[in-house]
């Protein structure tokens, strides 16, 4: 799945120099003359091609690598029409920093448990999965802050490297979480071989599809470096108009997987609890299912909230710079971080903690 990075919005009605409106072809001489009237250095026009301004993204035909190198100058502008964009980016940055700080705080909070339940235990597949999800999550949080803070200067090349890293880190973490979920469901279904094969096939298909779509997307994304009213901004442009559709498809695929895992978990849990009630028994099996379902439901609730808020952001707000739209986008980022990098590792920690209590009480 793609990282649901808060994508840098573009001004829905932004006009550059010659007054070109949304959807109009934009002359490059006009596009890159912004800021030249106040003596700032601006980027030279592209060797070939022109831009389209849309509500969501700036789309242009691909240019040759040589032309990109020859024209890789930073765009500088103090145009007040950029201020709504700058303010929106600042609001979003606050949420990203808060979410990243939450990931690191949760790691510090559970580090004692990690030492006792992970590092001092016999190494297994779950140990490796936990360490990957936990520490890739910390790297993701730090990289996301670096690429988002407008006072931190990053070149288009650095931004491209950071974004590529975020994309692949998100894909790796989602696959690892899928493996963790398969292991939990396999145990809940009393190690059923049919369930295991079914889930592995589904996860492999989803993982391969997401990896292919991620590679296609990254191949057609280019970055442009801007200095807008003293803030550093790196914005993306897509050479192919279908790239946003690929991102939406990965989102849908991820949602289908989470719904499938939830339905399988709920169905087997209800079945077991009914059997336990009929036989008037509980004990270890019932307690184990309770632990598994509590952590699974909290994990899915975070994913569901993230999905609803991201959908609400896309569907409800025509003005991407309004306070409401930025709050929706920021909260969706918080819940995404929580699902992947806080509740994800706790899927393993909770089970390890439960088994440690059983051993201590036996």
Image (cartoon, rainbow, N blue to C red):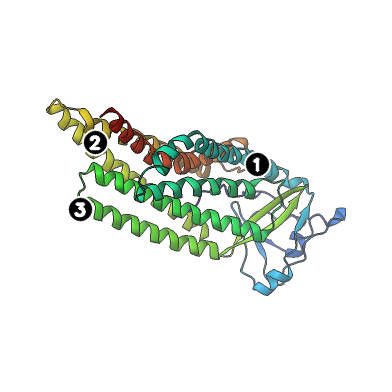
Residue 17 is labelled as none
The location of residue 36, given as percent across then percent down, is 83, 57
Establish if 79 lies above or below 273. Answer: below
Image marks 2 and 3: residues in contact by CB distance under 8 Å: no
Q: Can residue 325 be seen in this snapshot?
A: no
Q: Earlier in the sequence, mark 2 or mark 3?
A: 3
Query: Mark 3 against mark 1, which lies toward the viewer?
Result: 3
What is the total number of numbered labels drawn onto the structure image? Answer: 3
The location of residue 185, given as percent across then percent down, is 27, 44
Establish if 249 lies above or below 275. Answer: below
Q: Tell me what residue is drawn at x 68 percent, y 69 percent.
A: 68
Give the CA separation, mark 1 to mark 2.
Answer: 44 Å
Give the CA separation, mark 2 to mark 3.
Answer: 18 Å
Q: Tell me what residue is drawn at x 54 percent, y 53 percent.
A: 166
Q: Which residue is tagged 3? A: 194
Badge 2: residue crowd in 10 Å (few <14, some 14–19, many ≥20): some
The location of residue 139, given as percent across then percent down, is 55, 49
Q: Which residue is tagged 1? A: 88
Residue 269 is labelled as 2
Q: Earlier in the sequence, mark 3 or mark 1?
A: 1
């Amino acid at each position: 799945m793609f990282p649901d990075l808060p994508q840098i919005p573009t001004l829905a009605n932004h006009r550059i120099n010659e007054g070109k409106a949304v959807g109009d072809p934009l002359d490059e001489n006009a596009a890159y003359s912004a800021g030249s009237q106040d003596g700032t250095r601006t980027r030279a026009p592209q060797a070939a091609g022109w831009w389209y301004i849309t509500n969501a993204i700036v789309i242009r035909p691909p240019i040759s690598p040589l032309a990109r190198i020859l024209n890789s100058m930073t765009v500088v502008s103090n145009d007040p029409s950029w201020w709504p964009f700058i303010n929106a980016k600042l609001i979003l940055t606050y949420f990203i920093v808060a979410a990243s700080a939450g990931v690191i705080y949760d790691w510090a909070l559970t580090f004692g448990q990690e030492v006792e339940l992970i590092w001092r235990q016999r190494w297994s597949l779950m140990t490796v999965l936990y360490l990957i999800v936990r520490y890739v999550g910390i790297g993701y949080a730090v990289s996301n802050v670096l690429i988002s803070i407008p006072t931190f200067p990053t070149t288009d090349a650095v931004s491209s490297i950071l974004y590529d890293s975020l994309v692949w880190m998100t894909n790796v973490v989602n696959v690892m979480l899928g493996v963790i979920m398969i292991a939990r469901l396999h145990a809940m279904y009393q190690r059923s071989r049919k369930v295991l094969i079914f889930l592995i096939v589904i996860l492999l298909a989803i993982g391969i599809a997401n990896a292919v779509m991620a590679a296609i997307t990254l191949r057609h994304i280019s970055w442009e470096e801007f200095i807008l009213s003293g803030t550093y901004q790196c914005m993306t442009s897509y050479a192919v108009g279908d790239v946003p559709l690929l991102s939406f498809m990965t989102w849908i695929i991820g949602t289908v997987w989470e719904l499938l895992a939830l339905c399988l978990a709920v169905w087997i849990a209800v079945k077991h609890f009914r059997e336990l009630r009929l036989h008037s028994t509980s004990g270890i099996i019932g307690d184990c299912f309770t632990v598994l379902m509590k952590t699974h439901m909290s994990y899915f609730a975070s994913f569901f909230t993230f999905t609803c808020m991201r959908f609400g952001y896309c569907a409800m707000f025509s003005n991407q710079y309004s306070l409401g739209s930025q709050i929706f986008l920021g909260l969706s980022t918080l819940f995404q971080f929580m699902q992947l990098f806080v509740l994800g590792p706790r899927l393993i920690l909770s089970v390890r903690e439960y088994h440690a209590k059983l051993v201590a009480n036996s």
